[in-house]
Image (cartoon, rainbow, N blue to C red):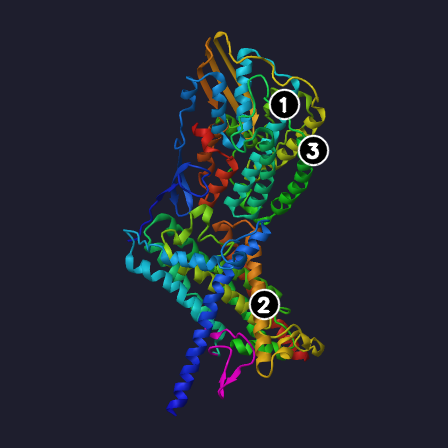
Amino acid sequence: MFRTQEMEINMGPQHPSTHGVLRLKLRLDGERVVDSWPVIGYLHRGIEKLSESKEFIKITPFTDRMDYVCAMSGNLAYLGAVEKLCGIKVPEKAAYIRVIMVELNRIASHLLWLGTHALDIGAMSIFLYGFREREMILDLFEAYCGARLTYNAFRISGVPADLPPGWKEECTGFLKLFRQRHREYEQILTANRIWLKRTKDVGYMDAEHCLALSVTGPVLRAAGVARDLRKDEPYAIYDQLDFDIPVDDGCDTYARYIVRMAEMLQSVHMVEQCLEKMPSEGPLMGMKGRRMKPRKDEEIYFAIEGPRGEQGVYLISDGTDRPYRCKFRNSSFANLQALAPMVQGGLVADVVAIIGTLDIVLGDSDR
Amino acid sequence: METQMFITILISVVQISIVLSLVALSVPLLILMERKVIGFMQSRIGPKRVGPSGMLQTIADGLKLLLKEDIIPDRADKWVFRLAPMIVLVPAFVAFAVVPFSGTGLNVFGQRITPWVTDLNIGILFIIAISSVGVFGIILGGWASNSKYPLLGALRSAAQMVSYEVPLGLALVGGLMWAGTASMVGIVEAQREAHLWFFIPQVVGTVIYFMAGVAETNRAPFDLAEAETELVSGFHTEYSGMRFGLYFIAEYANMLIVAAVATTMFFGGWLRPFPNVSWLAFLDIFNFILPGQWGPFMSGLMWVIIKVSCFIFLYYWIRATFPRYRYDQLMSIGWKWLLPLALANIMGTGALLLWLGQTG
């Protein structure tokens, strides 16, 4: 007489916690997830195709709009690729400024992750605390390049401007404050029983599966693999900095939380070193003029360690000042592949926790 | 004779309208307080624009809700959809009938007016019985919407409210054993006679009661039924305008009821702290300010309001601090921890009372 039926439900694209316009088709047995299909593409703007008709320098603003949470990293990955393609050297001071910006942006990105992830799980205050500190970083960026979200702060072969007067002191002050605030976040969450219950053993994915799905970044490091391009294939001036790679072998949402929290402190440490070691004098741009002259039929791949994982750019040149092909290897797209296996068999409440822990940005995955 | 009956009815009507309007008016105040308190906890300001420092914000919100279009989904079960918010709201208000707001009544025109609508000898039982009707409104509302997210929310809250009513009721039993009566007024009187607020011998009961009460009213960290980040907004996803407003008012009225019962049962209702210590009498400040019968009345009211506010504040504090529990974890806490603890509390209380009875 009575029968049960599995229910299909659409999570997103308009849902408070799918972090943008991710659509997730779920098949539910009561509250348990039987099957899931992530659907992406709602934010597709054809950036890769568009890039083929633009000069190299005009593509930089697009990279801001892909992963808009860490636009500095996007800039650096793309410009690094162009510099590698054309064989341009970046002056040391410019490289230092770039690293400072990118690492600050990593902190801002992780703060956004922390806030939204905790909000998804129901801790609402930490969201506002995180945004309070992120605001200070955005103020620093605004003081440097005038923009708060889509920075376009670097140029091919360097940076357009030196740090404004007083910026260093302000940044040092922020870093000092941030260390205190970081302790506050830890006090609220790290040993919180409910937080532990909601994150431990949720979204389990071991190293083997991570590697099979080419998942990178904190998700991979939380599975016990110490893969970090800043150490493994150092770019910019990372080989001159002293830092650790936080690794955890919990493979679950809690381990990813621990890794990202530790990464924020490492970034603070790096920015402090950069501010100290940065040469006070020196050129900011490595080349004069604007025309790019890459060799014909050259193909290069350049990747950096973004806040979400490997951010790579693949360029093919045909000898003109526009790329023949410009492919972005974005970490959100790769990490999203882990979503379906992770939510399998979990509850609806775990789905939002897992979307949060993967830290996806849909602008990044859809391009 | 007939005049006497008419007057009795008139007094009741006046009492009921006063209590109703008091509760209805305190809801916007509670919402404002929530937004302000949580705002300060989250290092922001909260509402500030409407009226002096945002005092009229919730009034404006309420007006906005009243003016909104009343959308009833095409495929909804229209009658049940309309009925459900009322099923939630009415019991929440009815339960206030037995809540004592102060200790002593007033004599107006030779008629005694008590600060409670009625003093049932089964007061606590009445509140528990009436407030458990509210869950039907939530289930029916979620079901009648004929939509998936509300259905999930309704299922969650059905399971949750049914499970947590058990420890909620059992947690009160310990207090009832101390009081020896189920009348709300009688319970406070018993605390006066025992020179003791019952939360002192009933710490476990108080904690269980409050936890179950938070779950019962669907508040954080047990707000699974609405769980904004999971189920969009749970059972009232499809509701708009004042029908949504009714759910909202009922939620806050239920919080008030839980706080009022806790105040009466465990924190001595209208009594001041240490009611038997005479040099603390100055705490009842209204006794010295206001003349005659108004003094004790206002002092009692003051203590009830202070105690209820503390509980409400605790609600907000918890909401600002904790993440949300998961559905299965919630169930396991309710059945595996709270229920056995409540039972053990009853046994312990019984043993203690027996021992006290023998020695004293």
Can residue B134 be seen here? yes
- Answer whether labels 1 and 2 touch (C-beta < 8 Å): no
Q: Quadrant of the C terminus of chain A?
A: top left
Which residue is denoted by mark 3 in the rendering? A169
Residue B85 in the image: above or below residue B104: above
Q: Nearer the viewer, residue A192 or A142?
A: A142
Which residue is denoted by mark 2 in the rendering? B307
The magenta-colored residue range is B97-118
- What's the CA distance linking mark 3 and mark 2? 49 Å
- What's the CA distance linking mark 1 and mark 2? 58 Å
Amino acid marked by disc 1: Lys
x%, y% of residue B86? 37, 64
Residue A218 found in image quarter = top right
Which one is in front in this view, the residue at disc 1 or the one at disc 3? Answer: 3
Can residue B174 be seen here? no
> Taking B228 as reference, is B142 left or right?
left
x%, y% of residue A28? 39, 44
Neighbour tally class for label 2: few under 14, some 14-19, many 20 plus, Cα within 10 Å: many
Which residue is denoted by mark 1 in the rendering? A231
Query: Are labels 1 and 2 assigned to the same chain?
Result: no
